[in-house]
Image: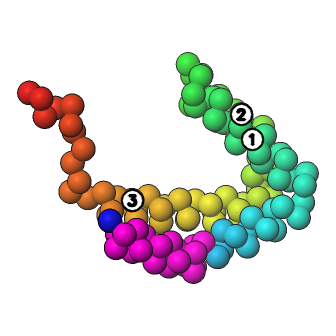
Amino acid sequence: MEELLQECRKLNKMLTESKQYKKFMNARNNLRRNEDLERKLRELYARNKEIQEYSGNAYEETERLYSENDELLHNSIVSEYIRAEDALCRLLREMLDITADGIRFDFLDEGR
């Protein structure tokens, strides 16, 4: 078990040294220097999450939300952050897919 955890620590170190993570941290720091942009983006993300979780018409509401925030989304600092965030999330998803490949966790079905 300890060997596995040690390998996870190595993977974490590799991740924090990756191009994607460094770009994300740089973009995040740039965004945080502008409190107004950061606040607006946080509000947009919160509203988008509400729509995805509770709306009966998520597609149209999301489209309207993004249309209403077009200027924010086309701000160079905000778009840099969103692109970097997306790249890091893609990397993390790919890493999780590879890590979980072949692992079966269906203990509820084992009783049958």
Is 28 within the magenta? no
Q: Determine which of the numbered discs, if any, sits on residue 47 in the image.
A: 2
Q: CA distance from mark 3 to mark 1?
A: 27 Å
In the rendered view, tell whether residue 29 sits above or below residue 50.
Answer: below
Q: Secondary structure at mark 3?
A: helix
Kind of element beneath mark 1: helix
Residues packed near mark 2 inside 10 Å, few (<14), some (14 to 19) or many (20 plus): some
Task: Name the quadrant of the N terminus.
Answer: bottom left
Q: CA distance from mark 2 to mark 1?
A: 5 Å
Mark 2 or mark 3, earlier in chain: 2
Q: Amino acid at mark 1?
A: Leu
Magenta segment: 2-21
Assess whether mark 1 and mark 2 are in contact (beta carbons under 8 angstroms). yes
**Residue type pointed to by label 3:** Leu
Q: Which mark is residue 96?
A: 3
Q: Residue at x 30, y 57 (%)?
A: 100
Relative height, residue 22 to residue 72 (above, below): below
Contact (CB < 8 A) between labels 2 and 3? no
Residue tagged 1: 44
Q: How far from the left and from the top, in percent, is residue 44?
A: 74, 41
Q: Is residue 81 left or right of residue 98?
A: right
Q: For mark 3, does the 10 Å Cα neighbourhood hold few (<14), some (14 to 19), or many (20 or more) residues? A: few
The kind of secondary structure the magenta stretch mainly shows is helix
**Residue drawn 86% across the image and 53% down it:** 37
